[in-house]
């Protein structure tokens, strides 16, 4: 995972082409980039983000900011109670407990940011 100005990118390696391919994953817009070396990949990532921000500015719109990390979820009262009990049992807030469960389900390390 790469990070630049709050934009996070997932990196893969295309073995057939012999290049690293990256995609910014925390915006609604498709931002991709590639490079043959780690340094070239980093430069391409930074350029892609800067170009995205500049393009959004030129279009008189704000760039699709990285996701804020806040999610509002409505559940039925019985589920809310069950979640609160589970959180209390683990000595966590409801928000921390829910974030842990979502991280597990998504296969993402919650502390990685």
Image (cartoon, rainbow, N blue to C red):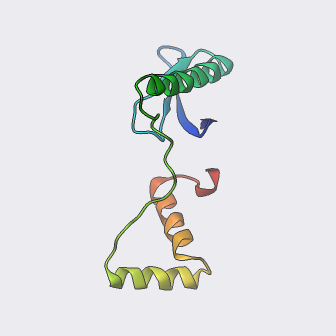
- Quarter-of-image position of residue 50: top right
At horizontal 34% and vertical 85% (from top left) the residue drawn is 78
Does residue 68 appear to the left or right of 41 in the view shown?
left
Rendered position, 29 above or below 87: above
Residue 98: percent from the left, percent from the top? 49, 69
- Quarter-of-image position of residue 38: top right
Find the residue positioned furthest to the front: 60
At horizontal 41% and vertical 64% (from top left) the residue drawn is 72
Residue 101: percent from the left, percent from the top? 49, 66
Task: Judge by depth and name the residue closer to the eye, 72 or 101.
Answer: 72
Q: How many marks?
A: 0
At horizontal 53% and vertical 22% (from top left) the residue drawn is 48
Residue 113: percent from the left, percent from the top? 61, 50
Rendered position, 9 above or below 43: below
Quarter of the picture containing the N terminus is top right
Task: Judge by depth and name the residue closer to the eye, 89 or 93.
Answer: 93
Find the residue positioned furthest to the left: 76
- Quarter-of-image position of residue 4: top right
Task: Judge by depth and name the residue closer to the eye, 70 or 94.
Answer: 70
Can residue 26 be seen by looking at this rendering? yes
Find the residue positioned furthest to the right: 39
Rendered position, 107 above or below 53: below
Can residue 21 be seen by looking at this rendering? no
Residue 112: percent from the left, percent from the top? 63, 50
Does residue 7 appear to the left or right of 77 in the view shown?
right
At horizontal 56% and vertical 84% (from top left) the residue drawn is 88
């Amino acid at each position: 995972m790469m990070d630049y100005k709050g934009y996070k990118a997932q990196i893969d390696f295309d073995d057939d082409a012999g290049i690293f391919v990256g995609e910014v994953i925390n915006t609604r817009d498709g931002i991709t980039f590639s490079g043959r070396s780690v340094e070239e990949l980093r430069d391409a990532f930074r350029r892609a983000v800067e170009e995205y921000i500049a393009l959004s500015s030129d279009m008189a719109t704000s760039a699709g900011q990285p996701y804020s990390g806040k999610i509002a979820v409505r559940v039925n009262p019985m589920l809310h109670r069950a979640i609160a009990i589970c959180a209390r049992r683990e000595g966590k807030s409801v928000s921390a407990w829910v974030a842990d469960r979502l991280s597990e389900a998504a296969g993402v390390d919650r502390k990685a940011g």
